[in-house]
Image (cartoon, rainbow, N blue to C red):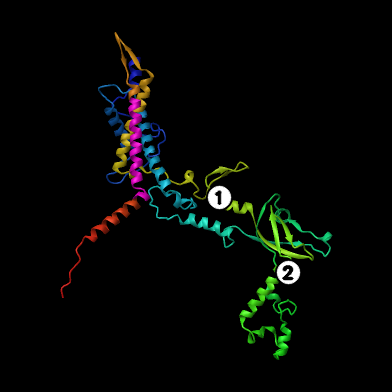
């Protein structure tokens, strides 16, 4: 009598117990309500278990599974449907989601994405703008170093380590590396010397003003006597003279060590613009994903960064349409075959009086594996056909076909 009771406990009795937190492994869908003709997870789980048992041969043959086995397979089937759908949506919409705040978009399940990816493009443009010194999110700083020069070469310093002088001393960050963007080291502009009578331009303005009777006037009135192009030619003459006859103003910058040319002969300040490398590098990384920092504290993410933290949650079961629920049932049956095959394969033969019975565990598992692969492939192909790229291609083809049809419409003939 006891042996028969043990056998009954490992065989499907024809119906299952109630679907609740004690009989379903995770219970994600137990508390959902339904509207109108919708069905809840609890109702479908119980009825699908009886359907699968009959599809596996009950009551003609015994099914070595009980209610909790069926319920676990059904919940796994729903979760697998969720996974494939959300996986496709993440890949399809990731370019539009990167950089968005998770606090504002905490659940994207079932929502249509109208974004064109502009937030991500703007973030990229800020990076390029900062490198071109026309904008960006990190500060480009300006500072100067005191150049020491003397008529005697022994008291002149020609090489300066900007990383040591600025990155460590001024920024107060040991080991902080800077990157120099611009160095302001050139001759005074020619316009500042255009009125210098000794600028070697071939003419003294003071003599001209005296001869023309304008000795008491400022050179700013010079436009009364000469056109503007003469000033431009004189500035060019000064610049060519300095370039050919004098030492050129330049510098070498290697590993943030700047070498000044020509050798300084007097003290002055040389300004330059720079940024901290750590500031620029940190702007190129989104705070994507939760992690533990160096001190062991838990840090949660605040922006969508990659595949791992896109907020797609489980699809409510009551909101899945009939097509999706039918896919879930078929995948559920394949999971039941796989589990039953594993159970039967453990004992491939059972001895009976005068013979033995061979179980079909291996065949069930092989059949289940093929069905699962086909169902996943079919679902992914359907999703790809409804994806953004496929829909745009379909609209393009439809537009061309419509244009071709309209071209065959006879033009109206006007009769006055």
Q: Name the residue rendered at 36%, 41% in the picture.
A: 380
The residue tagged 1 is 285
Q: How many marks?
A: 2
Q: Which residues are magenta?
A: 364-390
Magenta stretch holds residue 88 = no
Tell me which corner region of the image, top left, top right, bottom left or bottom right, holds residue 32.
Answer: top left
Q: Nearer the viewer, residue 408 or 182?
A: 408
Quadrant housing residue 232? bottom right
Seen from the viewer's position, the closer of residues 390 and 291 is 390
Can residue 187 be seen here? The reply is no
Residue 365 location, x and y as percent?
35, 26
- How packed mark 2 is, by other alpha carbons closer than 10 Å (few <14, some 14-19, many 20 or more), is few
Q: Quadrant of the N terminus?
A: top left
Q: Position of residue 189 (x, y in %)?
A: 68, 72
Please give the label number shown on residue 392.
none
Is 216 on the left-hand or right-hand side of 31?
Answer: right
Judged from the image, the secondary structure of the residue bearing numbered disc 1 is loop
Decide: is 357 above or below 93.
above
* Most foreground residue, 69 or 162: 162
- Residue 45 lies, in percent from the top left, at 33, 35
Q: Residue at x 69, y 90 (%)?
A: 212
For this view, does 43 lie left or right of residue 288?
left
Which tag is nearer the camera, tag 2 or tag 1?
Answer: 2
Seen at 69% across and 83% down, the residue is 219
- The percent position of residue 361, horizontal first and vertical second, equals 34, 22
Counting residues from the N terminus, which is met first, the one under dot 2 or under dot 1? Answer: 2
Which label sits on residue 245?
Answer: 2
Placement of the C terminus among the 4 image quadrants: bottom left
């Amino acid at each position: 009598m006891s042996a028969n009771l043990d056998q009954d406990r490992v065989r499907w009795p024809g119906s299952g117990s109630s679907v609740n937190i004690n009989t379903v492994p995770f219970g994600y869908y137990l508390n959902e309500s339904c509207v109108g003709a919708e069905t809840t997870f609890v109702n479908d789980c119980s009825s699908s278990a009886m359907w699968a048992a009959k599809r596996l041969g009950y009551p003609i043959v015994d099914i070595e599974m009980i209610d909790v086995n069926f319920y676990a397979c059904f919940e796994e089937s729903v979760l697998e449907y969720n996974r494939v759908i959300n996986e496709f949506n993440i890949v399809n919409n990731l370019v539009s989601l990167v950089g968005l705040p998770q606090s504002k978009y905490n659940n994207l399940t079932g929502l249509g994405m109208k974004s064109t990816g502009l937030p991500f493009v703007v973030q990229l443009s800020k990076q390029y703008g900062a490198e071109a010194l026309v904008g960006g999110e990190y500060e480009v700083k300006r500072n100067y170093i005191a150049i020491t020069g003397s008529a005697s070469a022994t008291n002149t310093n020609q090489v300066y380590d900007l990383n040591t002088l600025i990155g460590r001393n001024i920024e107060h960050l040991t080991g902080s590396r800077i990157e120099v963007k611009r160095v302001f080291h050139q001759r005074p502009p020619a316009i500042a010397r255009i009125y210098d009578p000794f600028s070697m331009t071939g003419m003294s303005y003071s003599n001209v003003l005296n001869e023309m009777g304008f000795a008491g006037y400022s050179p700013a009135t010079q436009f009364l006597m000469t056109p503007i192009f003469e000033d431009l030619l004189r500035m060019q003459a000064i610049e060519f003279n300095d370039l050919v006859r004098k030492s050129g103003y330049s510098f070498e910058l290697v590993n943030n060590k700047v070498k000044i040319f020509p050798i300084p002969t007097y003290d002055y300040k040389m300004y330059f613009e720079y940024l901290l490398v750590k500031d620029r590098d940190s702007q190129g990384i989104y705070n994507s994903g939760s992690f533990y920092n160096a001190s062991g504290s838990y840090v949660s993410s605040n922006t969508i960064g990659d595949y791992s933290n896109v907020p797609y949650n489980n699809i409510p079961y009551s909101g899945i349409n009939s097509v999706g629920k039918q896919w879930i049932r078929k995948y559920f049956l394949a999971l039941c075959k796989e589990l039953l095959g594993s159970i039967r394969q453990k004992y491939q033969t059972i001895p009976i009086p005068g013979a033995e019975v061979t179980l079909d565990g291996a065949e069930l598992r092989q059949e289940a594996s093929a069905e699962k692969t086909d169902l996943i492939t079919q679902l992914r192909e359907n999703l790809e056909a409804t994806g953004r790229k496929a829909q745009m291609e379909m609209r393009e083809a439809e537009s061309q076909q419509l244009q071709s049809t309209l071209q065959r419409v006879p033009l109206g003939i006007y009769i006055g």
